[in-house]
Amino acid sequence: MPGRTTFSTRNPEAVGAASPARALLVHLSGMLDHSLGGTRCRTIRPIAHHAGNLPRALAGTVRYATENLGRTLIRVDFDSGQSLMVLPDDVRLDAACALGAAE
């Protein structure tokens, strides 16, 4: 559309170095990525969702990752009962699990 300005989200390559969860994901091609399934993680900031807020440092278990509209989303089952799609920048994988997955 002429005259229309489009804005993109963050540059994925630039974010990859800053996000431990993103660095461990295998390349997604429109399918579900179960490579991190079962990995424990924690929120690194409060996350707003339809039923309220998830607090910082809330633990959960990764189910899978997927790509939608050019961004990676991770499905996490949190210990408080919520199951949400979050951005890789919103969670940090537990150190012991992340080291095992990277090898």
Image (cartoon, rainbow, N blue to C red):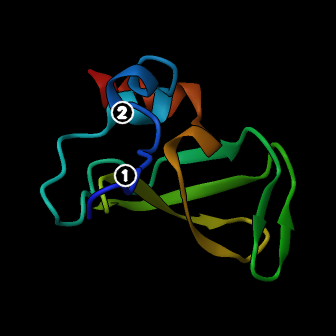
Task: Please tell me whether residue 23 is drawn above or below residue 90 in the rendered image.
Answer: above
Task: Please tell me whether residue 93 is drawn above or below residue 23 in the rendered image.
Answer: below
Q: Position of residue 70 (x, y in %)?
A: 29, 53
Location of residue 53 by image quarter: bottom right
Q: Residue at x 50, y 43 (%)?
A: 88
Location of residue 78 by image quarter: bottom right
- Left or right, residue 66 beside residue 94: left
Q: Position of residue 7 (x, y in %)?
A: 44, 47
10 Å neighbourhood of mark 2: few (<14), some, or many (≥20)?
few
What residue occupies the far front of the structure in this picture? 3
Callout 1: SS: strand
Residue 71 is tagged as 1
Q: Is residue 91 visible?
A: no
User: Which residue is label 2 attached to?
Assistant: 12
Q: Are marks 2 and 1 in contact (CB under 8 Å)?
A: yes
Q: Residue at x 63, y 44 (%)?
A: 90
Amino acid at the residue labelled 1: Arg
Q: Position of residue 40 (x, y in %)?
A: 56, 47
What residue occupies the far left of the structure in this picture? 29
